[in-house]
Structure formats: structure tokens, C-alpha cells
């Protein structure tokens, strides 16, 4: 099994990113050979400033390393393995306008302003196809919103194999992992925890110190009721449910087992336990992250090593694709 996954670069990572995404990638290293790339070329299709792109790429890489992505996986910048872009160009000869026109993300993101959208926004699903096909990926982790793009990658692979009478690209399968928890704001149980929330008290940043983590949990919105003995009792209590969800995710337990342990207790008792748990899980990640952010050259060196390993895997596939089309 070879898993290839692109990671959107973003700074200011928070507990929602950690429990909802990063920890899933760390666990995936156990399942097969993993290539994780920071999707810096994809970022160019949006409106990102050069400084923001450079910083978010290194911060994302440092966070992934701090969270446990290690040499079992290959972590690198997409832009540093030119085979992605080279294969993308070849596959643009295979992909059809009609296929890309049907992509719902293109329609959503371009909106009514299609004439003003970047060409990259239109063609980036072809780059996504190249990202995985260049490694002959067998599996690609996909959320709901990316299923259509994986289908497209399979269509491109199949048409290429047929058009050029080769058996070059395996059709990558979706990798459905255990549903990731959705973490809500600490101030409003109906809003997602997000870096774009103006209130810093709404989220736990991965860079927060122990006292800040504890203070944010202490001040988080909850209610005056006691914890029920079944998760069903949390259905109409979004803030209470969120704190239980966070506890369960941090402890890697089921929410039901958490409410059973705290049934009949109030948040005055639950919050300090949650704060201790959060600090015990997040402090080691934060300490490694702080070290890495103080030594960005070391992060860059790790990424350069990753790019070298990835390039070696990509080279034979690119060469075969070039030969197939007569280059
Ligand atoms: P933000 O909402 O802070 O801008 P992003 O959109 O950059 O976060 O998300 C990066 C990754 O983290 C995505 O895989 C997304 O699904 C996951 N993620 C973001 N926020 C949460 C959350 N509150 N709960 C669970 N997963 C989340
Ligand atoms: Na977002």
C-alpha cells in the first residue's frame, strides 16, 4: 500500500487541526508507505502572499514533525519535486475540458467570476492527479469534498493507459479512515474551532503554553447541569458535548466511556481533569514545535531530504510517461 496525500499549508494550527487532521496522518504511517507533501504549488491557485506561503509551509512542516511524522513517512514540499509539475503538463493533454468543467469545487470557488478566476484554479485537479499518479499511489485519503477529484484522477489514469497503450498508472483507491472528530469553538458550541475566529479564547493553539491551555478550558462555555450517564443526554447541550468530545479524542477513548466515568459530576470537576489531560497530550507537541520553529533551517533540511527521497520514487514514472507520449 502506497499512500500519497497533499497537505494544505496553514499557520496558527489549533486543537481542531490536531485532532481532526494531523493525528490521522501520524497514524497513517503505521498503515503503509506514506508520502506527505506540503501543497505549496496548489496554494498558488488562491490568494496567498509570498511571505504567508513561505511561513505557513515551514510552520506546517514543523507542526507535522512535532506531532510525530518521522522518517517512516516521506515529508516534502510539492514544489521541490519538479516531476509533479512535469507530469501535470503531460496529463493536461489527457484531461478533457468537459471533465474539469464538471468539478463542483471549481464551480464553488470560481463562483460567478469565472472570467476572473486563475487558470490554475481550473486545472488544479490535474495537478492533484499528477501528485498521486507520479508515485503510482494505491491509496489516497479523501474527505467528502475531494472524492470527485480522485474520480477525475482515476479517469485521467485510465484514459492515459488506454490512449498510449501502456499499463503505467494503477487507479488509486480512496482511503477511508476512521471518522475524525469535529472540534467546536470553546466559546460557541455551534461554531467550528477555527484559526479565523477573532476570539483567541475560542481555540487552543498548538503553540499555547500550559497555563494558557488550562485557562482557556476553565473559561470555556459549558452549562450548569451535571454530566449524564449516556452520550444521548448531551444531544441538546452542544458546549458540554464539545468538551466531552475533546476529552475523548485526547484520551483516545469513546465519548460514552468518558461520560460514564464523570456521570453525576459537574463541569467544576470535569474541566480541571480535561485541562490536565490536554496539557499532558499537547505540551510535548508544543515543546518540540517550539524547538523546530527556533531552528527553521533544520526543518528545511528535513524537507530537502524528503524531496530527494520522493524525487527518486517519481523519476521512473515520469520517464515512462514521457516515453509513452514520445518525449
Ligand atoms: P481552519 O478552519 O482553522 O482554517 P483549515 O481549514 O486550514 O482550518 O483545516 C485544516 C485541516 O484541519 C483540515 O483537514 C480540516 O478538516 C481540519 N480541521 C480544521 N478545523 C477543524 C475542527 N474544528 N475540527 C476538526 N478538524 C478540523
Ligand atoms: Na478554513
Image: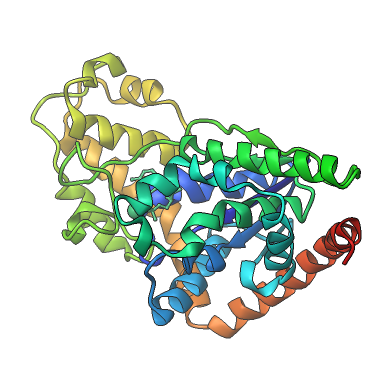
Where in the figure is residue 60, as x and y percent of width and height? 49, 66
Residue at image location 49% in from the left, 44% down from the top: 101
The relative height of residue 167 versus residue 110 in the rendered view (above or below) is: above
Say whether residue 73 is left or right of residue 196. right
Q: Is residue 178 left or right of residue 215?
A: right
Q: Would residue 288 be seen by someone viewing this image from the given angle?
A: no
Q: From the viewer's perspective, is 228 left or right of 130?
A: left
Give the residue displayed 61% in from the left and 79% down from the top: 300
- Residue 128 is situated, as x and y percent measured from the top left of the image, at 61, 53
Q: Does residue 74 sit above or below 19 in this rendering?
A: below
Above or below, 120 relative to 139: below
Q: Nearer the viewer, residue 136 or 163?
A: 163
Report x, y in % for residue 284: 48, 61
* Residue displayed at 37% across by 60% down: 115
- For the C terminus, the quadrant is bottom right
| Residue lying at 69% horizontally and 63% vertically, measured from the top left | 89
Of 62 and 104, the residue lying toward us: 104
Q: Position of residue 14 (x, y in %)?
A: 36, 56
- Quadrant of the image for the N terminus? top right
Give the image quarter of residue 37: bottom right
Q: Is residue 184 visible?
A: yes
Q: How is the image coloured?
A: rainbow
Amino acid at each position: 500500500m502506497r499512500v500519497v496525500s497533499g497537505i494544505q499549508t496553514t499557520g496558527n494550527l489549533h486543537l481542531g487541526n490536531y485532532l481532526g487532521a494531523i493525528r490521522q496522518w501520524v497514524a497513517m504511517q503505521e498503515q503503509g508507505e506514506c508520502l506527505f507533501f506540503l501543497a505549496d504549488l496548489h496554494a498558488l491557485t488562491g490568494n496567498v502572499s509570498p511571505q504567508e506561503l513561505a511561513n505557513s509551509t515551514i510552520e506546517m512542516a514543523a507542526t507535522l514533525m512535532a506531532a510525530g511524522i518521522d522518517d517512516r513517512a516521506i515529508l516534502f514540499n510539492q514544489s521541490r519535486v519538479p516531476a509533479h509539475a512535469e507530469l501535470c503538463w503531460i496529463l493536461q493533454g489527457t484531461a478533457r475540458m468537459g471533465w474539469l468543467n464538471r468539478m463542483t469545487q471549481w464551480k464553488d470557488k470560481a463562483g460567478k467570476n469565472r472570467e476572473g478566476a486563475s487558470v490554475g484554479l481550473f486545472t488544479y485537479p490535474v495537478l492533484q492527479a499528477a501528485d498521486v499518479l507520479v508515485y503510482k499511489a494505491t491509496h489516497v485519503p479523501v474527505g467528502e469534498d475531494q472524492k470527485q477529484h480522485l474520480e477525475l484522477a482515476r479517469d485521467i489514469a485510465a484514459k492515459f493507459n488506454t490512449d498510449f497503450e501502456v499499463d503505467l498508472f494503477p487507479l488509486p483507491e480512496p482511503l477511508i479512515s476512521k471518522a475524525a472528530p469535529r472540534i467546536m469553538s470553546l466559546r460557541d458550541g455551534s461554531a467550528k474551532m477555527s484559526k479565523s475566529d477573532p476570539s483567541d479564547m475560542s481555540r487552543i493553539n498548538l503553540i499555547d503554553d500550559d497555563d494558557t491551555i488550562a485557562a482557556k478550558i476553565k473559561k470555556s462555555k459549558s452549562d450548569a447541569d451535571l454530566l449524564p450517564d449516556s452520550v444521548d443526554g448531551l444531544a441538546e447541550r452542544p458546549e458540554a458535548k464539545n468538551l466531552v468530545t475533546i476529552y475523548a479524542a485526547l484520551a483516545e477513548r469513546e465519548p460514552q466511556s468518558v461520560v460514564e466515568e464523570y456521570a453525576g459530576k459537574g463541569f467544576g470537576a470535569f474541566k480541571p481533569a480535561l485541562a490536565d489531560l490536554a496539557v499532558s497530550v499537547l505540551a510535548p507537541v508544543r515543546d518540540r514545535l517550539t524547538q523546530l520553529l527556533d531552528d527553521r533551517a533544520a526543518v528545511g533540511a528535513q524537507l530537502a531530504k524528503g524531496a530527494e527521497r520522493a524525487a527518486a520514487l517519481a523519476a521512473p514514472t515520469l520517464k515512462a510517461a514521457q516515453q509513452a507520449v514520445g518525449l
